[in-house]
Amino acid sequence: MKLYWTHGAAVLACIALSSCGLVGGGAKAPKGQVVATVNGEEITVTELNREIGGAAPADAEQRKAMEQAALQSIISRKLVAQAAKEQKLDKTPAFAQQELQTKESMLVGAMQRKIAAAVPNPSRAEAEKFVADHPHMFAERRVMVVDQIVVAQFSPALMKEFEPLTTLEQVEGVLGRENLDFQRTTTVLDTLNAPEGLTDTLMKLPPGEIFIFPRGNAVFVNQIRESRTLPFTGERAVNYATAGIKQMRTQEAVARQLETIRKAADEKITYNEKYKPAPAKPAAKTPAAPAPNA
């Protein structure tokens, strides 16, 4: 979480931290790519722009105000970080573990971005074929308003009781009888971005049919209240398909690279016996094909 303090609060913080002195006080005024210094630690234009992010102010005055707000936020953060270092909070085991985890996550992200940069963009013909091959996402796209009950996992026997039910009120009655907590809500399902298996199920449902699917530690009991056809076509559909194909291929490339790295390192990984994974089960043998008739 970022600290967003006002300029006055930053000055008060600086006064409270006895060793920090005034920001840049007594030092030579920063120039060029350095916008400020805090106890000798530089804040660069690059760091300031990163703090602002992708914001696009309407005019120079708004840009200046945005820069000042971002700069004061950086200064406050650096002051608190410097004070934490003086108190040796960066030397604790918990900090070291979190720092390592953060660094590893950043390295993984850098590797993923490198792999993604090497994945070629799909051709227009590939994107158009994808649109044509997935009518439920595009030409026949459906947007559905769904009434939903969310409940914790329950026994298969109880699931059997739901089969003849035709309304969510009846489902609520069964859950109430079993003293199971649940939440009633409404959501929107869009076949443009719904999982393909779920989309196939939805398209085959009779009107008003209740359908159930698990997700994580919960079960979702659903009934479609309203369904509309909203075709997604033209250039927007092609662009969406292009991005989707690129994302899928990037995920596949990352998975392949991970598999390669794991295979190359398998012999270098050692386990404490208590945490050693169970050996992989041998793959089932495929029965031999019958000999052709003479």
Image (spheres, rainbow, N blue to C red):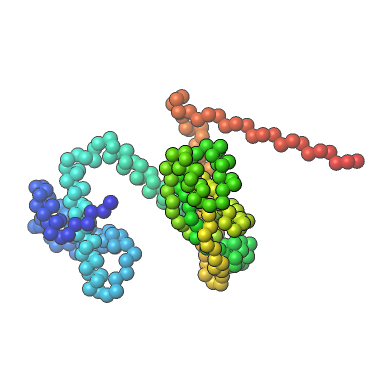
Q: Residue furthest top?
A: 273
249 left or right, relative to 182:
right
Q: Residue furthest right?
A: 294
Residue drawn at x 32%, y 41% is 98
Is residue 39 at least partly visible in the picture?
yes
Is residue 196 at least partly visible in the picture?
no
264 left or right, relative to 101:
right
Q: Residue furthest bottom?
A: 59
Looking at the picture, how far across and down is residue 231, in whole percent? 56, 69
**For residue 47, above or below residue 106:** below
Looking at the picture, how far across and down is residue 254, in whole percent? 50, 49
Looking at the picture, how far across and down is residue 275, in whole percent? 45, 28
**For residue 107, above or below residue 57:** above
Looking at the picture, how far across and down is residue 64, in whole percent? 22, 69
**Figure quadrant of residue 27:** bottom left
Residue drawn at x 56%, y 72% is 234
240 left or right, relative to 11:
right
Residue drawn at x 27%, y 39% is 95
113 left or right, relative to 263:
left
| Residue toward you, 262 or 235 | 235
Count every numbered label the image shows and give the total. Answer: 0
Q: Quadrant of the C terminus?
A: top right
Residue drawn at x 88%, y 41% is 293
**Figure quadrant of residue 71:** bottom left
